[in-house]
Image: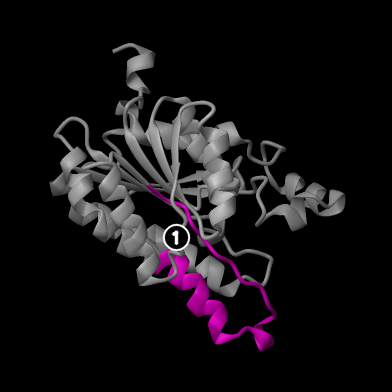
Amino acid sequence: MTPDALFDVSGRTVVVTGGSRGIGLMIARGFVEAGATVVISSRKAEACQQAADELSASGTCVAHPADLSTQDGIASLTERVRELSSRVDVLVNNAGATWGAPIDEFPDSGFDKVFDVNVKAIFALTQQLLPQLRAASSAEDPARVINIGSVDGIAVSASDNFSYGASKAAVHMLTRKLASVTATDGITVNAIAPGPFPSKMMAHALDDPEHRSEIVDRIPLGRPGAPEDIAGTAVFLASRAGAYLTGTVIPVDGGLTGAR
């Protein structure tokens, strides 16, 4: 098999939640430029459409705004995906939320909001799209679910993100559990655990020279992640090259959690 065929994802239908910015946009761009048809969602309608218009210059991208912290938002996205295609080859559960506050001040809402988006929405959307994922699967070419976890679900963060780190650890375990029950349907489920990447969530740290230097000093490879790093990992998992992996959590972090 040639390298081009091994990593080919052209013609596939891909859904990327939280696809209008940050890591979601990086992944969506990677799939669009690789020839896939991509549906992106985000909570903000204008930002979602702007991102889809930008990506459509390189291929096919459809926007559908939806608040995945609600059942109505999940149902809305599910229905739109079903209208567009009878099959989903790849579902990327990327939409996420965070909350930071000192332990004495951390509110209940900081757990409810983060777990609703980061954990419950992953399960609910995967559950709702199971018929389309099953329709896309075959023995040699399974459908793929890719969940976006975090290094904060692997190692203890220095920030006061109590619910975020806990939610991402839950994403990693949910990934393994889903993988164990969907394999017989011809669906693989894996997670990517990104380290520091240029995104709105990391802007407060990476845009400040002092904080950026502190972060980079902790990364063995000596730099934050680039769009190609995260998009390449997602495309690999979605291609024939990644067809025999399921239940894995892949840190894409420059060695931050594995080499120290």
Which residue occupies the extreme bottom position in the image? 104
Q: Residue 42 lies in magenta, yes or no?
A: no
Q: Is residue 180 above or below residue 226?
A: below
* Of the pair 241 and 64, the residue shown nearer to us: 64
Instruction: Tell me if I can see residue 123 in this picture.
Output: no
**Residue sitting at 55 percent across and 82 percent down?**
109
**Residue sitting at 44 percent across and 69 percent down?**
69
Q: Amino acid at mark 1?
A: Ala
Q: Is residue 53 above or below residue 204?
A: above
x, y (%) of residue 157?
A: 63, 64
Which residue occupies the extreme right position in the image? 210
x, y (%) of residue 16?
A: 43, 46
**Which residue is label 1 attached to?**
66
User: For residue 160, what is the image quadrant?
Assistant: bottom right
**Is 106 situated left or right of 12 in this image?**
right
* Element marked by disc 1: loop
Instruction: Tell me if I can see residue 254 in this picture.
Output: yes
- The residue segment tinted magenta is 92-120
x, y (%) of residue 140?
A: 18, 30
x, y (%) of residue 235?
A: 42, 32
Q: Residue 117 lies in magenta, yes or no?
A: yes
User: For residue 61, what is the image quadrant?
Assistant: top left
* Of the pair 61 and 28, the residue shown nearer to us: 61
